[in-house]
Image (cartoon, helix red, strand yellow):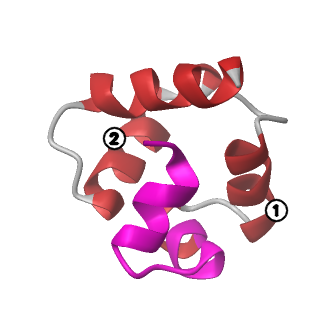
Amino acid sequence: MGLKELRTKRGLTQQQLAEKNGVTRQHVAAYESGTHEIGNMTLNKALALCDALRVRNPRKLLDSDSETSAD
């Protein structure tokens, strides 16, 4: 499951996720489109993203990003 799917499953808009993660909506859009890779995110941002999306294991988020990028 990719970032966009996780975000929508949690009922969040890009703007809401951006605010929870301390980034701009454009950053969230770039992560979802693959322009920016989640794996290049700082640890603090990655943990905030996992917290906002209620993902317990950050590895799942990274794995979902690499699956999305491969498509």
Query: Is residue 11 on the magenta stretch?
Result: yes
Question: Which amino acid type is shown beneath numbered disc 1?
Answer: Gln
Q: Which residue is mark 1?
A: 26
Task: Determine whether, in the image, residue 26 is placed left or right of residue 60.
Answer: right
Residue 58, horizontal then vertical, whole percent: 29, 30
Question: Which amino acid type is shown beneath numbered disc 2?
Answer: Leu
Q: On the image, which quarter does residue 23 sit in?
A: bottom right
Compared with 4, 71 (above or below) is above
Name the residue located 43 percent from the left edge and 37 percent from the top edge: 46
Between disc 2 and disc 1, whose residue precedes?
1
Q: Which residue is mark 2?
A: 47
Between the residue at mark 2 and the residue at mark 1, the CA separation in whole angstroms equals 19 Å
Compared with 64, 28 (above or below) is below
Name the residue located 79 percent from the left edge and 48 percent from the top edge: 30
Task: Determine whether, in the image, residue 28 is placed left or right of residue 2.
Answer: right
Residue 66, horizontal then vertical, whole percent: 56, 19
Q: On the image, which quarter does residue 65 sit in?
A: top right
Compared with 14, 46 (above or below) is above
* Magenta residues, start to end: 1-18
Residue 34, horizontal then vertical, whole percent: 76, 35
Give neighbour class at mark 2: few <14, some 14-19, many 20+ (Cα, 10 Å): some
Name the residue located 56 percent from the left edge and 62 percent from the top edge: 22
Residue 11, horizontal then vertical, whole percent: 40, 82
